[in-house]
Image: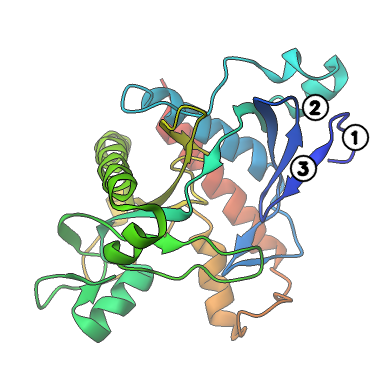
Amino acid sequence: MSDISLKKIYSGKVRDLYEIDEQRMLMVASDRLSAFDVILDDPIPGKGEILTQISNFWFQKLAHIMPNHFTGNTVYDVLPEDQARALEKRAVVAKKLEPVKVEAIVRGYLAGSGWKDYQQSGSVCGIALPAGMREAQQLPEVIFTPSTKAAVGDHDENISFAECEQIIGAELAAEVRAKAIELYTEAAAYAKTRGIIICDTKFEFGLDEEGVLTLMDEVLTPDSSRFWPADQYQVGTNPPSFDKQFVRDWLEQSGWNKQAPAPKVPAEVIEKTVAKYREALSLLTAG
């Protein structure tokens, strides 16, 4: 992305940010893939464009629940035409916000680190669950299980709600929890009508100049969520995924120790991952 005429201000695991002015920045989704907090050597071609389109769909669909980082500008308002044309599907003009210092994770089903936690303790992030639950089972109610925000290369750590309150304050923690659950609940109900179960997801929030909680970054993409095909779902087994879980599963089976560098992902795994991303986009946004 070196051919952008704006100053780069941040490069994350997946997204790069560029300065526009005091209020706005350009957020560009790359084709980089991060798994287990390690950036893989091999990009996923077209991933940034597909995920940006999925995110933009959700930002608009959920705008009645809370404000988001959209400014109303397009890339054509802030870049020369040739650059704008190259980036229009993978870049958004976003408000500059002060990030809330926790990851807002919402779970509707028992999977991943939540399932491991439950097997050991009968609870997930300190939230007690009924005995005898099985992998991939729907939870009795949607739960909010925050984690810390790790720097690039570090691992996010699951935390209790009490720890979340200590980090960002009780009032903000309560608002983040309520909004995250509301966003997930509405999105999961819609996705189910399109043949997708959203097992869990991660939201990012920021505060604007007035201190208003604002949805930002990416929303309900196959990178920030676990998407399952509803027609292949059954309790007791982890369904095949629409998302980067596909790559994560391959990495888990490869025997990798989850420290950089990651092993080279085979071309066919990358191709299947791109196909899954495209399928998710078409299912969610068709018609």
| Separation (CA) of disc 2 from disc 3 | 20 Å
Left or right: 133 in relation to 271: left
Mark seen at residue 147: none
Front of the two marks 3 and 1: 3
Do the residues under discs 2 and 3 have CB atoms within 8 angstroms? Answer: no
Instruction: Name the one closer to the observer, 242 or 157.
Output: 157
Which of pointers 2 and 1 lies earlier in the amino acid sequence?
A: 1
- Give the residue at mark 3: 9
Which of pointers 2 and 3 lies earlier in the amino acid sequence?
A: 3
Residue 50: x, y in percent? 60, 37
Image height check: is 204 above or below 64?
below
Residue 56: x, y in percent? 52, 28
Residue 40: x, y in percent? 70, 65
Local secondary structure at mark 3:
strand
The 10 Å Cα crowd at callout 3, few under 14, some 14 to 19, many 20 or more, is few
Give the amino acid type for the residue marked by disc 1 in the picture: Asp
Identify the residue at horizontal 84%, vertical 15% (top origin): 81
The 10 Å Cα crowd at callout 1, few under 14, some 14 to 19, many 20 or more, is few
Left or right: 156 in relation to 12: left
Front of the two marks 2 and 3: 3
Quadrant the C terminus occupies: top left
| Separation (CA) of disc 2 from disc 1 | 10 Å
- Give the residue at mark 1: 3
Q: Quadrant of residue 178?
A: top left
Quadrant the N terminus occupies: top right
Local secondary structure at mark 2:
helix
Do the residues under discs 2 and 1 have CB atoms within 8 angstroms? Answer: yes
Give the amino acid type for the residue marked by disc 2 in the picture: Ala
- Give the residue at mark 2: 86
| Separation (CA) of disc 3 from disc 1 | 15 Å
